[in-house]
Image (cartoon, rainbow, N blue to C red):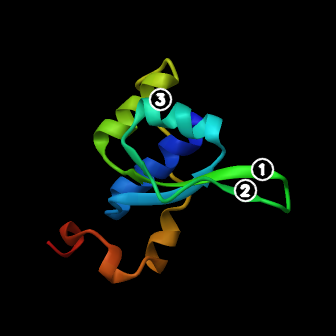
Amino acid sequence: MWRIGIGVNEYGLAAGVNHIAWYTGPSFYATIKRVMQIEPLGLPRHDENDDETYIAALSRVDEASLAAMRARLNDPQEHITFALAPIFNFIPESLRSNQEAA
């Protein structure tokens, strides 16, 4: 699970993304909350389709979050090359980092 988070955060940093909205079950939410800064987006909701409860959250995309996730892998130097780089072209310019224009 940490490998996906690392890849998403690496991509977010490269693309100038500051926050990511996502949802998950309560146990994973609790795990992530111990590692990085996240904020719930409302109360947990029950999904009748799969009989599960989910929590929507907003997490920061920053070097501290990335370092915390890497530490959880027991290999802080592990690096995932983001394979989604071409999708950067589809990110609206209003959401891209101002650094790109510099």
Instruction: Identify the residue at the far top of this view.
Output: 74
Identify the residue at image location x=49%, y=51%. 8
Identify the residue at image location x=31%, y=63%. 16
Mark toward the viewer: 2 or 3: 2
Instruction: Identify the residue at the far front of this view.
Output: 43
Crowd band around label 1 with a 10 angstrom C-alpha radius: few (<14), some (14–19), many (20+)? few
Local SS, label 1: strand
Pointer 3 residue: 78
- Going by the numbered disc 1, the residue's amino acid type is Glu
- Going by the numbered disc 3, the residue's amino acid type is Glu
Using residue 48 as the reference point, say whether residue 98 is left or right of it.
left
Using residue 97 as the reference point, say whether residue 9 is left or right of it.
right
Q: CA distance from mark 1 to mark 2?
A: 6 Å
Q: Relative to residue 1, is residue 96 depicted above or below?
A: below
Q: Earlier in the sequence, mark 1 or mark 3?
A: 1
Mark toward the viewer: 1 or 3: 1
Q: Are marks 1 and 3 in contact (CB under 8 Å)?
A: no
Local SS, label 2: strand
